[in-house]
Image (cartoon, rainbow, N blue to C red):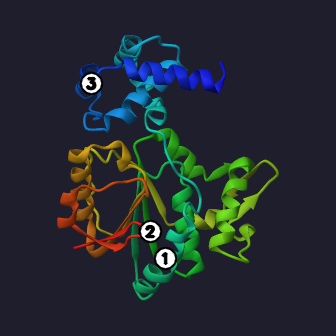
């Protein structure tokens, strides 16, 4: 099937799923497995479900429902298809330039810099920040926590191994951020892949974590949560933003994605630090 035919099939199936059917499925998943999708943004979740139905030739929502409720491992393995991860190394270089200019300067005398990558996906953002810290001479002081709901994505993040195809995409942004920088200082570069050097992994702890329902009993100076909340409705966004508020040190920074829209209520918790880069500071 061509990509055009696949996309048409996904669109057709998505439009056939009613809000009531979606609600029934998410409630059933929550009741049976304790995984909560009930407040995810409807349109995005429907598209993820349609993508699963098409990929596994399940025919309809009923076919997916039957498969999910009989096979927990199938559901766990399909989380990546439900929630498409938007991440790249040095994505939006101006963000990293701002972090280098402002945050690294503020934290240069801090003994420990505590960072949480919430929804770390396959790890590109983690290692981008590790390079920023390393360039500033601060990586040795970093205490980095990286979490995601997807075990598959987190396994890729822990490995830090990326195809040459992806690396070609990342290299331009790397050079824009770091003119004259040598990629071989941070990566082992082979013909068909690049791998993050072990020296950039030593201060990172990985943990499976569901932002929707799991606590985080730790305080951080910086929290990254980029292009994750696009899947959440307003209620769920505020739940997660309150979690981040309670996990941030006073004056700590929350860095979100360009596509993340924050509810009006969030102004009670955060001030906008820099509108161009979507960096917020805890009140």
Task: List x then y, in percent, for residue 218.
Answer: 29, 63
Residue in the image at 71% along x and 75% along y: 181
Q: Do tag 1 and tag 2 residues touch (Cβ < 8 Å)?
A: yes
Q: Do tag 2 and tag 3 residues touch (Cβ < 8 Å)?
A: no
Spatial separation of the CA atoms under disc 1 and disc 3: 41 Å
Residue in the image at 40% along x and 66% along y: 278
Looking at the image, residue 97 sits to the left or right of residue 230; the answer is: right
Q: What is the number of the mark on residue 277?
A: 2
Spatial separation of the CA atoms under disc 1 and disc 2: 8 Å
| Mark 3 residue element | helix
Q: Give above or below for 44 relative to 159.
A: above
Residue farthest bottom in this picture:
109
| Mark 1 residue element | helix
N-terminal-most mark, 1 or 2: 1
Q: To which residue does mark 3 refer?
A: 19
**Count of picture labels:** 3
Q: Give above or below for 258 relative to 93.
A: above
Q: Quadrant of the C terminus?
A: bottom left
N-terminal-most mark, 1 or 3: 3
Spatial separation of the CA atoms under disc 2 and disc 3: 34 Å
Task: List x then y, in percent, for residue 10.
Answer: 49, 23
| Label 1 Cα neighbours within 10 Å, binned few <14 / some 14-19 / many ≥20 | some
Task: List x then y, in percent, for residue 139.
Answer: 53, 75
Q: Quadrant of residue 174?
A: bottom right
Relative depth, front residue between 125 and 269:
269
Front: mark 1 or 3: 3
């Amino acid at each position: 099937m061509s990509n055009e035919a696949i996309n048409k099939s996904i669109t057709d199936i998505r439009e056939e799923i009613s809000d009531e059917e979606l609600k029934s499925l998410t409630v059933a998943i929550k009741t049976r497995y304790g995984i909560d999708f009930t407040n995810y943004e409807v349109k995005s979740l429907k598209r993820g479900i349609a993508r699963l139905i098409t990929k596994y030739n399940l025919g309809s929502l009923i076919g997916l429902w039957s498969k999910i409720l009989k096979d927990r491992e199938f559901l766990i393995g399909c989380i990546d298809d439900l929630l498409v991860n938007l991440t790249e190394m040095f994505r939006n270089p101006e963000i990293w330039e701002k972090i280098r200019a402002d945050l690294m300067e503020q934290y240069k005398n801090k003994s420990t810099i505590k960072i949480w990558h919430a929804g770390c996906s396959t790890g590109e953002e983690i290692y981008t920040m590790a390079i920023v810290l390393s360039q500033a001479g601060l990586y040795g002081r970093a205490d980095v926590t990286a979490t995601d709901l997807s075990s598959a994505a987190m396994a890729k993040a822990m490995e830090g191994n990326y195809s040459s195809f992806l690396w070609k995409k990342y290299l331009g942004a790397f050079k824009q951020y770091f003119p004259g920088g040598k990629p071989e200082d941070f990566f082992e570069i082979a013909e068909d892949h690049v791998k993050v050097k072990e020296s950039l992994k030593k201060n990172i702890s990985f943990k499976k974590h569901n932002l929707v329902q799991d606590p985080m009993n730790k305080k951080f100076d910086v929290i990254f949560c980029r292009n994750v909340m696009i899947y959440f409705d307003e209620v769920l966004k505020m739940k997660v933003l309150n979690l981040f508020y309670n996990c941030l040190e006073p004056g700590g920074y929350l860095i979100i994605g360009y596509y993340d829209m924050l509810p009006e209520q969030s102004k009670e918790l955060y001030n906008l630090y820099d509108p161009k880069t979507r960096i917020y500071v805890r009140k």
